Image (cartoon, helix red, strand yellow):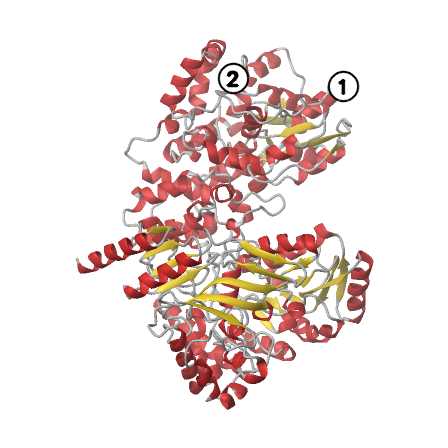
Amino acid sequence: MAERQDRTALVRALGSAVRGEVEFGTTARALMTMDASNYRRVPLGVVAPRDADDVAAALAVCRAHAVPVVPRGGGTSIAGQATGTGVVLDLTRHLGKIVELDTASRTAVVQPGVVLDDLRAAAAPHGLTFGPDPSTHSRCTLGGMIGNNACGSHSVAWGTTADNVHALTVARYGGDTLRLDRGRWDGAPAGLRELVGSHLALLRTGFPELPRRISGYALDALLPERGPDLARAFCGSEGTLGVMTEATVRLVEAPGSRALAVLGYADESAAAEAAPGLLPYRPLTVEGMAADLVREPAGLPRGGAWLFVETGGDTPAEARAHAERILRAADAVDGDVVTDPAGQRALWRIREDASGTATRMQDGSEAWPGWEDCAVPPARLGPYLRDFRALLTAHGLRGTPYGHFGDGCIHVRIDFDLLSGDGVARFRRFSEELAALVVAHGGSLSGEHGDGQARAELLPRMYGDELVTLFGRFKDLWDPDGGMNPGILARPARLDENIRFDVLPKRPVDVTFGYPHDGGDFTAAVRRCVGVAKCRTAQPAGTDVMCPSFRATGEEAHSTRGRARLLHEMLAGEVVTDGWRSQEVRDALDLCLSCKGCRSDCPVGVDMATYKAEFLHHHYRGRLRPATHYVMGRLPQWLRLAAPVAPVLNALARIRPLASLAKRLAGITAERTIPVLAGETFTRWARKRRGRGTVILSSDQVVTVWPDTFTNHLSPEVGKAAVRVLEAAGRTALYPERGVCCGLTYVSTGQLDKARTVMRRTLDRMGFSLGDPLVVLEPSCAATLRTDLPELLPDDPRAAELAGSVRTLAQYLEEYAPDWQPPRLDRRVVGQTHCHQHAVLGDAAERRLRERAGLEGELSGGCCGLAGNFGFERGHWDVSVACAEEQLLPSVRGADPGTDILADGFSCRTQLAQLAGVRARHLAELLAEGLNGTDTHAVRPKPLRRPT
């Protein structure tokens, strides 16, 4: 009772003092239990301050109530320092402003929630950039970078974050504010100057000299000969001293052009030993990566390990010449210089995604952080790596090293068993021995990500007891009440406490999908999310899709990571206590478009569309469902019933009052227009056509065309066009004798029992053609057959056989009619690659077919926002439109007259028709019209309109 009263009083006091959001509910707490580490701590609540005054007010209230505070940015910390048991300050929601950008002094003044890529984008027009660039640059914040003293791949050229900070404004626990500058003691906590002055000898001798010494507090920055530099001493303090509310940072001149020398070596030790010899050439990066991290060669030169050495220059020729000098000087097995920006981006993506891809070993087993960023002097890196590999072997562990070889910093995820007591005990033994090994090589326990809870306990091995005791005194001068992020860095928790897996079920949860990549274990599937938060980017990378709902709302609960965190807490049962019936989880999943983008774009392959379907299946079991589940979710059966009276229903839908009533009863948003039903279904047209006689010359000329619900009842013109194209390629199209369905709409609404019934019936009816190529024209149906079918029916071999036979039209033509020449259309196209095609099927064959047909132009990435039933459901209109406005609608509006609008998905075509007033076509339609010699020019895009 007393605890509840204290909590109520705290909430009331924060609500009175802070203008930002004060959230102590289940969802807010569940979202903040973890960062990207192995650790989990449950907070009391979350405060999102609106400005620096709000930060100070929140700190004052928390001190008055003796509640600890954890400042948090993007939540991508890998050592546990962004978790805590008190109040979490979410500095990303409102404190993301670039206050000033001064090109003359090459400085910027930023708030803590500014995302690094936003600062770099603002500086880029002036030829400037912020030097440190962690692989999480698209979502990490400047506050978090300062808290961890982040580095990134360009630190060999531009140093760490601490090297690029001029001044800081800091709020302390209790609310008072300090200004920290270089070269001045003004603003220092009382007693700090005296503490330093009385320990000069220790501070001058106690810190190893190496470029990536991130561990501990940077007390040596306060030595007289170095400043003192209060701002530098604050960097890397991991939220344990105060909260940065404003920073003045240095900008550097960005090269006009860049080139990339990719050097292949026999193994990682050879690459590591070569790296220091390249530093005199003044490269921008010297990054290393071993072959066991690369799942596909991706155009890399020969070798068992590689160095990525980036160079800069005022011109492309200068950058290339610089890279070629390095290539000639390097004693590499093989090498190449890449100057094409797209090629460089593709290679860098392999490296940047490593923090996610390294979480899975080649055999699919899990690997975890904890010791992923130790650093040694660069000249010692080769011997250290050999000793490190030997230590792994001695403990029966595996890992895939990569990282900043030029700085002697190695990242690695290790296949620790953190689920059992014996495994955690081995984790501790290994940690202790590795700490000793790093110190023996003159290194730092942390070379980038900070100590947090993962390594701080072992700092005495690196610094000795006397210096670590001084760290505690330093912390006390800043935070005498001990309220700032306790248990981190100073007086830390044990490295084997608060493991985030301790609370998860010990036995597999009873679920419906097979989860073949997670051993059939839903808990293991949810564990896939390690928190690197690629889903939290404001702009998708290239043609990526993930995560459209987060980009539309900007809320953590609507990111893939946020939803995974809620599912984790649902399984844990401590914060989210009502399991599958949880309203909080349901609400977070409600705005998930089931686009499947995370299945391909998430570095660890989180598949939120599947998890959502699973959750909805259990959540509504034995309960009344939303109206759209009965209408949109069972669309195939309703359309079959409606087909004979389609003209009548179309006429009724044009009567506005009747249409409004129907939409209201069906749970469809009022802004949507009801699609027009086909007067003649595709299957009816096919039966009539077959009745006129078809000559089949040989079995290899036959292909089965899947009559999906959307093609059959809503866009039969797509099916007819595909048949024309297949016949032009010398093939005869056949169709299932009886109605079949992939089960898509049942899956997306979580009606999984019904989905399995439909799928089994389909397998029974498709028996004659199992294993033969199956052309599926609707990408969402093809994706369902390829993935959901075998994962819902894992014990039926026919499901895997049918899934393996699925082809898109372009894939089929490329594989079975490679010599066929499509009509030459020679015109430009815009439009969108369907999100399910991107995530599951890939669009390489479509790209090649468009090129052969002379269709020029790139299709948009992202998601159209309609996404099957999602965009029709009440409450989803704003998010649906926002998703379309991200890439699709701007590309269509900006198209030149006569440009064809291309979209293979029915949802994409419908969204374009209803929001932009344009008719988009399936690739099959454009090709068929070209065969006919008819004009394929599309309607010129019209301004956005919102239909009634």
Residue sitting at x 41%, y 18%: 660
Q: Position of residue 825 (x, y in %)?
A: 76, 27
Classify 206 as above or below 422: below
Could you tell me residue 460's position as x and y percent?
44, 82
Given residues 911 and 132, the one toward you in this image is 132
Look at the image and tell me whether residue 731 can be seen: no
Mark 1 secondary-structure assignment: loop
Residue 838: tell me if it is visible: yes
The quarter holding residue 486 reads bottom left
Q: Which mark is residue 676?
A: 2
Between label 2 and label 1, give the one nearer the viewer.
2
If the image is split into quadrants, where does the N terminus sit?
bottom left
Q: For the point 60% across and 58% down, which residue is it?
A: 352
User: Which amino acid is tagged 2?
Assistant: Val
Q: Is residue 289 left or right of residue 264?
A: left
Residue 42 horizontal/vertical position (percent): 33, 59
